[in-house]
Image (tube, rainbow, N blue to C red):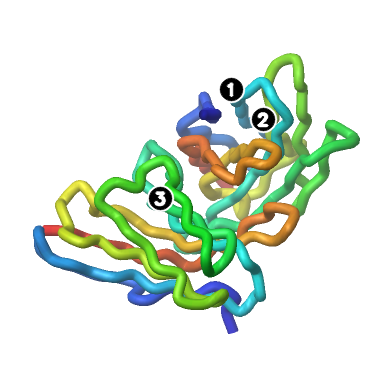
Amino acid sequence: AQSVSQHNHHVILSEAASLELGCNYSYGGTVNLFWYVQYPGQHLQLLLKYFSGDPLVKGIKGFEAEFIKSKFSFNLRKPSVQWSDTAEYFCAVNTYNNNDMRFGAGTRLTVKP
Amino acid sequence: DADVTQTPRNRITKTGKRIMLECSQTKGHDRMYWYRQDPGLGLRLIYYSFDVKDINKGEISDGYSVSRQAQAKFSLSLESAIPNQTALYFCATSDFEETQYFGPGTRLLVL
């Protein structure tokens, strides 16, 4: 079964700093890739997703992610974070025709005002 | 109104008790899921269902059972609760593009 690794458990940034959160998965076949965000006290919501096509995907609130197939990675980026981006971020993978969705352990982002 | 609702939102129970967590959705999706969230472990899939007659085990189904009473309803049961089932439980639905829509969660404490 596939697995998902998020190497950063807790990231602390100042406002306007650039963000990159790492996500690697282990599966050799075709995958669908997702980033979800969980703001404090709220449920998870989709930030962006990749199924096929342009490997650079743009999501809501200025986030983007790049799928690098050779590195089995789908890193999340934002050029300039805001205090309101403080949240927990989850990378998720499911494989084509297999709906066993796997989530990473999550990365907690704290943005200092 | 919320698209995915869960009841109860919080529950405290004792070891050995049977409890049921309920999930309802108004999105019209066929696919529904139950996850648990534990600190440092992210979300892990317990069960999923693609339609009323289809139930599948996820990554960590032991100690849990589910019932898909209708397209809109998917219940999770703990037949005999144990303390390590203390967690935050999420229900989700998904569309044909696999985007998942999550409920607000049920915080369960097993004493």
Residue type indicated by callout 1: Ser
Residue toward you, B49 or A16: B49
* Secondary structure beneath label 1: strand
Residue A67 sits in which quadrant?
top right
Q: Chain of mark 2?
A: A
Mark 1, residue position? A26
Residue occupying image coordinates x 36% and y 43%: B60
Residue B9 sits in which quadrant?
bottom left
Asked if labels 1 and 3 touch by Cβ distance under 8 angstroms, the answer is no
Residue B66 is marked as: none
Q: Rounded to the nearest whole Å, what is the CA distance between mark 2 and mark 3? A: 30 Å
Q: Which residue of the protein is positioned furthest toward the bottom in this rendering? A: B1
Q: Chain of mark 1?
A: A
Residue B17 sits in which quadrant?
bottom left
Residue type indicated by callout 2: Glu
Instruction: Classify 10 Å Cα crowding around label 1: few (below 14), some (14-19), many (20 and above).
Output: some
Mark 3, residue position? B46
> In the image, residue B68 lies at what x, y percent?
46, 70
Q: Is residue B83 left or right of residue B53?
A: left
Asked if labels 3 and 2 touch by Cβ distance under 8 angstroms, the answer is no
Mark 2, residue position? A20
Residue occupying image coordinates x 77% and y 40%: A50
Residue occupying image coordinates x 49% and y 39%: A106
* Any part of residue A25 in sight: yes
Q: Is residue B46 above or below residue A42?
A: above
Q: Nearer the viewer, mark 2 or mark 3?
A: 3
Residue occupying image coordinates x 44% and y 45%: B58
